Amino acid sequence: MTTRTTAGTPAATTTVLLAGATGMLGNRIAAHLLDQADVQVRLLLRATRAADPAKAQALDTLIAAGATVAIGDVTDPASLDAATAGVDVVVSALQGGRDIIVDGQVALAQAAARNGARRFLPSDFAIDLFAAPEGAPQFDARRQADRTIDALPMQVVHVLNGAFMDMMLDPATPGLIDVSAGTVMLYGTGDEQFDLTTVEDTARFTARLATDPADVSGVRYLSGARASFNTIIAETERLTGTPLTRTVLGSADDLRHITASADDPWSVVPQWYFLAMLTVAPFATNDNDRYTDARPTGLRDYLTQAHQALAAAA
C-alpha cells in the first residue's frame, strides 16, 4: 500500500503490529508510532474491549488516532497468522510470566516470520539482561525467548534502556525516596552505577527503531542518565532542600542470599532487579544520538520537572 507525500510522490506505508498496547509502555509506543507519517498501527488484542475502564479509554484514544485492532492471543498460536498477515514490523511490549514472555512471544515472532515481516522487537526494555544474574526469572525468560527469536529470518532489535527513571523516582509516589518523610532506602554502597531512562523516551526511541529504514538489527541502548543512588539522593536534596536519611537495606551479598534461598524466584523479583542494578555494568555505549530530535531526558531535567509538577499540584 502507498500514501502520498505533500509533493505528490508515492511513499511506502509501514504496517506495525503492536502486542501489549494495554500496558503503560506499549500504549506509549503505539502513540509514538501513530505520530509518524506513513505508518499504519495494528493492535493485537484478546478482545475488542478491555475490561479495565482506564485501559479501555486508552485503547479508544489510540483507535481514534487511527490504530486498527487485530483479535488474537499469543497463548493461542493459531490466532496469530491473521494478525501478522501483511505486517512489516512486529513490536512486543508484552509483560508476564514464561507462558507470555517465552511461549507466547516466540509464537508471535514465528508467526511474524512465517508471514513475511522484516523486523521484530521483543519485549526486553531493561538493564543489560544479557549480562544479568543467572536465575533471575524475568531476565532468564527473556534471554530464552531471545535465543529462539534471534534465529528467525528477520531483523531482530533488542531495546535496552536501563531502569525506568520515572517509575523508580517519581516523587508523587514515594518509594525508595520519600521526600515528605525525609528518608531513603537503598541497597549496596550507593556508589554502584546504572542506567535510567523514562518510559516516554523509551517508547519514542522504540517507535523510531521500529520504522527506521536502515537495518537496525542487534542490541540498541538508550540511557537518559548513568547514575547511582548517591547521585540521585544528592540531586533530590539539592532540588528540594530536604536532607534525606539513608537506610541501607542490604548488600549485593545479602540480595544473593535472599534470591538463592527463595522457594519461588518470582516471589523475589524486586530483589533480583536490585541485584542486577548493583552487579551489572552500565552500558558501555548508547544510541542516544541516533535520532537527534528524540534524545532522552537527563536525570536533573527529569527530577526538576517532576518536583515542579508535584509542587504545582499541591
Image (spheres, rainbow, N blue to C red):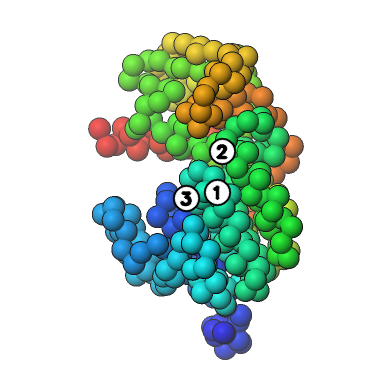
Indicate left or right for 217 with 203 as reference: right
Q: What residue type is labelled 2?
A: Gln
Residue 268 point in image, percent of width and height: 50, 26
Q: In which image quadrant can residue 133 be found?
A: top right
Looking at the rendered structure, the kind of residue marked 1 is: Ile
Label whose residue precedes the other's in the sequence (1 or 3):
3
- Disc 3 crowd rating (10 Å Cα; few below 14, some 14-19, many 20+) is many
Tell me whether the residue at label 1 lies in contact with that at label 2, contact meaning CB atoms closer than 8 angstroms: yes
Q: Which residue is drawn at 61% across and 56% down?
A: 106
Residue denoted by label 2:
138
As rendered, which of 26 and 309 lies closer to the eye?
Answer: 26
Is disc 1 placed on a helix, strand or loop?
helix
114, 167: nearer the viewer: 114
- As drawn, is 131 to the left or to the right of 250? right
Quadrant including the N terminus: bottom right
Secondary structure found at label 2: helix
The CA distance from mark 2 to mark 3 is 17 Å
Residue at position x 56%, y 18% in the image = 261
Residue 217: x and y, percent? 72, 58
Rounded to the nearest whole Å, what is the CA distance between mark 1 and mark 2? 9 Å
Residue 275 to residue 292: above or below: above
**Quarter of the image that includes the C terminus:** top left
Q: Is residue 38 above or below residue 221?
A: below
Q: Which residue is drawn at 61% across and 80% down?
A: 12
Q: Point out residue 143 in the picture as x, y percentages from the top left corner.
A: 66, 44
The reply to whether residue 143 is visible in this rendering is: yes
Secondary-structure class at tag 3: helix
Q: In the image shown, does 126 or 171 lie closer to the viewer? A: 126
Q: Name the residue under label 3.
A: 25
Instruction: From the image, tell me which residue sits under label 1.
Output: 101
Amino acid identity at mark 3: Leu
Whether residue 228 is visible here, answered yes or no, is no
